[in-house]
Amino acid sequence: MKALVWHGVDDVRVDTVPDPQIVDPTDVIVKITATAICGSDLHLLDGYQPTMKEGDILGHEPMGEVVEVGSAVKKLKRGDRVVVPFVIACGECFFCRKGLYSCCDTTNPNAKMAEKMMGHSPAGLFGFSHLVGGYAGGQAEYLRVPFGDVGPQKVESGLRDEQVLFLSDIFPTGYMAAERAEIEPGDTVAVWGCGPVAQFAIQSAWMLGAGRVIAIDRVEERLAMARTHGRAETINFDEEHVYDTLQEMTGGRGPDRCIDAVGCEAHSHGSIDAVLDKVKKTVKLGTDRAHVLREAIYCCRKAGTVSVPGVYVGMIDKVPFGAAMNKGLTIKSGQTHVQRYTQMLLDKIEAGAIDPSFVVTHMRPLDEAPELYKTFRDKKDGCIKVVLKP
């Protein structure tokens, strides 16, 4: 089969690789009909995520048709149309039973490696390094999906792929980010970033009762999407000082809830901390660029909440924890417990409450993936979200 393969930093290619096979009786094989490039994939392209190996298949936002089922699978059959969550969960461990699927205790075969870096291991993830299992990803013609009765979400309506595809990651991720922000009716919610996850965090903030949403970015196409589809007020951080502008917009109190939908590759307009981050990354003395997290802590009102769906990888410094403590902030983060949300969000799509396809700007064949990774990363050609068709 064809698949998008990692060969090194800034080097991804479409190669011919062996087709996946049933390994465990709980596996299913899915023929991919649509898959997407995620902002998190750029951390792999740019070399931020450790433990990648040449030959790894990328991608964690897939959907398609079940073509083979293991002997222990009971809920799926050949021909079922499914969306596959990026989180691989067993459904039976302590964490899965609590609905904390991204903390699954059993699906990362490289748990010892992760424990050395993080203290405890998260769940296995598709296409996202050997630190989280080394599982082949879904930017391919076929995908092996472990625990077929736990992860895949059946889609039995006639909705187009691009309307349901994002149940694999970015719609639940944006929703969980807004949920974890603890939004109360009428709250002012500030969202850093206007990429795909941020767009769904904006949509979800309204669903959860926000009275006002303010979105922060520098790319006009993304800001325009936040205004048009997200009904958000916007700040261009190349043109305005974010803290001063938010203070003015909120009467000096600050936003009630702040969402960092950017993560470890934050940019800024020449701030000292961002310059230091860039220098440390360049000389390999640091990993993540955490400007947005710092700024969200400074900007959030006293006793407010900072929600962090943006991916961070390693050690970060210069975090104003004194501000967080003295202001009484609540900080919540985590990989998304996707399986907790897929049915509920599918119901919203089927009811016409939201059409997630609004984020798609590029729909192309899988063969064009290497070029589109760079188009997406460099924010060229108005690119906000890429859907690939194998």
Image (tube, rainbow, N blue to C red):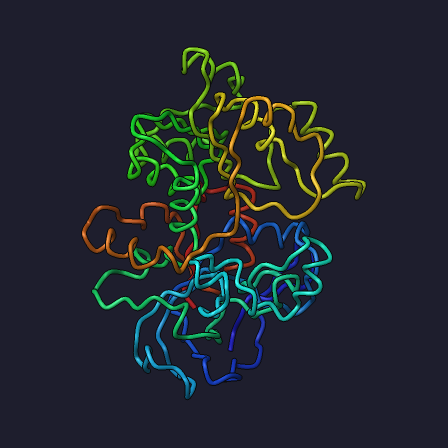
In the image: residue 61, left or right of residue 137: left
Give me the residue at 57% from left, 69% from top.
Answer: 135
Q: Is residue 292 left or right of residue 338?
A: right
Horizontal side of residue 192 vs 277, given as left or right: left
Q: Is residue 94 above or below residue 213?
A: below
Q: Position of residue 234 (x, y in %)?
A: 40, 25
- In which quarter of the view is residue 166 placed? bottom left
Q: Nearer the viewer, residue 224 or 203?
A: 203
Q: Is residue 66 above or below residue 225?
A: below
Q: Where is the C terminus found, in terms of image quarters? A: bottom left
Residue 80 x/y as whole percent: 30, 76
Give the residue at the far left of this rendering: 351
Question: Can see residue 30?
Answer: yes
- Quarter of the rendering containing residue 98: bottom left
The number of numbered discs placed on residues in the rendered structure image is 0
Observer-nearest of 239 and 81: 81
Does the image show residue 367? Answer: no
* Left or right relative to 301: residue 121: right
Query: Residue 332, how many percent across, how many down?
Result: 51, 40
The picture quadrant where one finds residue 31 is bottom left
Q: Residue furthest bottom?
A: 71
Give the residue at x 42% y 25%: 256
The image shows residue 263 at horizontal and vertical percentages of: 57, 41
**Compared with residue 64, is residue 78 higher up or lower down, i.e. above or below?**
below
Image point (43%, 41%), residue name: 180
Q: Is residue 332 above or below residue 215?
A: below
